[in-house]
Amino acid sequence: MTTGTLFSSVVPGARDRAGNDPIFALNAEAARRAAAGESIVNATLGALMTDDGRLAVMPTVLETMARALDATTAGYAPIAGAPAFLRASIADLFGERAVANQAVAAATPGGTGAIYQAVVNFLEPGQRLLTTSYFWGPYREIAGHAGRDVDTFEMFSPKGGFDIDGLATALDRHLSTQGRALVALNFPCHNPTGYSLTEAEWRAVADQVRRAGEVGPVTLLLDCAYLRFGGTAAEAWVHAVPKLLETITVAFAWTASKSFAQYGARVGALVALHRDEAERAQIANALGYTCRATWSNCNHLGQRAVTELLADAELRRRTDRERQGLVALLGGRIAAFNDAAEAVGLSMPRYDSGFFVTVFSPNGAATAASMREAGVYVVPVSGGVRVALCSVAEADVPRLVDALGDGVRAARAYGGRT
Ligand code: PLP
């Protein structure tokens, strides 16, 4: 009889992995305490919640999903995605602009799948994805799991704006050390800092990335998960695309998760643009191959419903209106947060839209730990804590900001930087 495990089937590289995202683990702890009757403010999870704690949904989206369920959507979708869905996601990014003719796309399970597509097709094994010093944590897991890695450049200049020089230097370094560069920028409404590039910053980014494209193969991946929450400034990148296409590949991680409040549907696309038709065919083939080799094909029902929502004028009008309600809900919280944060003297980037903001702290882990004692949950990140205002009722904002002020002071007293 065998007592205990003699052999482990789990290969060394996969041993001792955290099976759950740390944010989901913190969220679960906050939910447990709340269920046990404690008064808890939970600013961990990146889903937009109503002020009374329900997931904020869009009725027209739910109706359309229900209607789209039939015998055809029970069947497999085409491997690379339903053609009408791919056309609709490209049109959602570019409308009638001519640049849409230079795009190819593949359906993916959310933005996550699109980032995976970019990592495996625009980087060799062992190479590094370049991104900002503050970044969405799963970039590291997606890259690492695919045998790639992440490298960063300082996101903010000493004046508080986007560090263009940091990006330019890092691009040059990647081209000289690995012979290619894939840079991921998550704007507007950057997760975790809340920062959105200004139009001038977009232009400067485009200049630098375009310049780097003269030296070697460069792909700019715009992770636009929060695109529809970014207001009009969010469209600034559109003007930069034709110039970028003179030298580089531009790719978009497009997702329905936030813009249609359909996190669970797993509907997304990697949309890639290149000036050369033969190169576009290469890209489309590579993306289709990756679909087949990973998830095979994506949610058919979700693609059908999202296509209708994007392509049918009346559905689009209704969805836009419902989304405006969600943007306004979040806007009220952001205004309350900014006022209270200024009064308390919190240090943070400019925050005018989006689900999150980062409050700077000399020790994010110590800040988050001291806040948890006060029943307020945020996520520690290097250099601060991420506050998911998307899941906090406006009435709880004053308590949240007070706890942040106390937490940052506690971290200063504790010392050390993480
Ligand atoms: N990128 C960023 C910055 C995100 O915050 C998220 C989700 O939280 C995603 C991509 C991917 O989202 P999904 O895979 O749900 O579309």
Image (cartoon, rainbow, N blue to C red):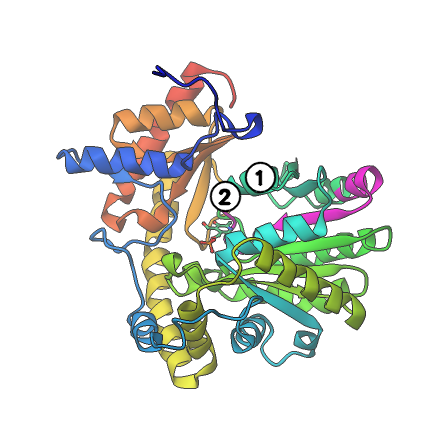
Residue situated furthest bottom in the rendering = 313
Q: Which numbered circle lies on residue 145?
A: 1
Q: Residue furthest left?
A: 37
Q: Is residue 187 magenta?
A: yes
State whether label 2 is within 8 Å of ligand 1.
no
Q: For mark 2, what is the residue? A: 193
Toward the front, the furthest residue is 1
The picture quadrant where one finds residue 248 is: bottom right
Mark 1 and mark 2: span between their CA atoms? 25 Å
Please, what is the three-letter code of the amino acid marked with disc 2?
Thr
In the rendered image, the residue lying farthest to the right is 215
Give me the residue at 55% from left, 28% from top: 11
Task: Give residue 271's quadrant in the image.
Answer: bottom right
Which residue is painted at 40% across and 22% down in the image? 366
Q: Which residues are magenta?
A: 171-191
Q: Position of residue 212 (x, y in %)?
A: 81, 51
Pick the residue in front: 124 or 382: 124
Counting residues from the N terminus, which is met first, the one under dot 1 or under dot 2?
1
